[in-house]
Image (tube, rainbow, N blue to C red):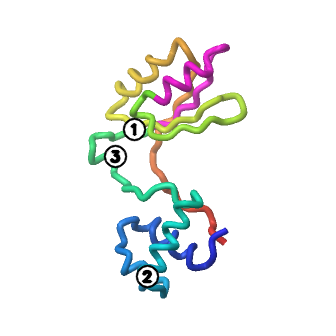
């Protein structure tokens, strides 16, 4: 379980994964080597999986996002999962309980782009699609306390 300093480091890095070690150290009141050791330990424990960059999909021409619920046809679960993993426009996907097996987030250039992707799985699964109007809550950390 992370202590208070670890939680502060995680919060700072979530806001900006490119913060220099010296600045991180100053903000948590430790030396740079101590912060470096803590970060290495958090990585080894698996708490920090990656340091990443967040991009704006619209800047790459992806003007639409969609949430697609996917229900594989009988006997097609593994085939559909492999297909989902291979579609690069699916940027996130959860395997869930309930009526649907997968809930996927797609980045799309336009509606016809959505049609092409859905057509590629139509013979293997039923889908239900919602177009994303806005994201009032972006991906964020759960409470660290």
Q: Residue at x 67, y 14 (%)?
A: 74
Residue under label 2, please give it. 25
* Helix, strand or loop for disc 3: helix
Percent x, y of residue 6: 56, 74
- Position above or below: 133 against 6: above
* Distance CA(mark 1)–CA(mark 2): 37 Å
* Helix, strand or loop for disc 2: helix
Residue under label 3, please give it. 57
Q: How many marks?
A: 3
Q: Quadrant of residue 94?
A: top right
Which quadrant holds the C terminus?
A: bottom right
Percent x, y of residue 30: 48, 85
Instruction: Name, please, the residue furthest toward the bottom.
Output: 29
Q: Residue at x 40, y 38 (%)?
A: 107
Circle 3 or circle 2, nearest the eye: 2
Q: Residue at x 71, y 35 (%)?
A: 97
Instruction: Name, please, the residue furthest toward the right.
Output: 98
């Amino acid at each position: 379980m992370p202590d208070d300093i670890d939680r502060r480091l995680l919060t700072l890095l979530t806001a900006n994964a490119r913060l220099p070690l010296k600045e991180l150290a100053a903000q948590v009141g430790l030396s740079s080597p101590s912060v470096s050791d803590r970060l290495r330990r958090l990585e080894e424990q698996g708490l920090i999986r990656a340091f990443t960059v967040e991009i704006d999909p619209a800047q790459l021409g992806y003007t639409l996002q969609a949430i697609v619920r996917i229900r594989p046809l009988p006997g097609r679960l593994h085939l559909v999962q492999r297909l989902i993993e291979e579609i690069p426009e699916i940027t996130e996907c959860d395997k869930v309980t309930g009526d649907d097996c997968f809930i996927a987030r797609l980045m799309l250039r336009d509606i016809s782009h959505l049609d092409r992707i859905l057509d590629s799985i139509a013979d293997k699964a039923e889908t239900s699609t919602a177009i994303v109007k806005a994201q009032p809550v972006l991906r964020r950390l759960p409470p660290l306390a």
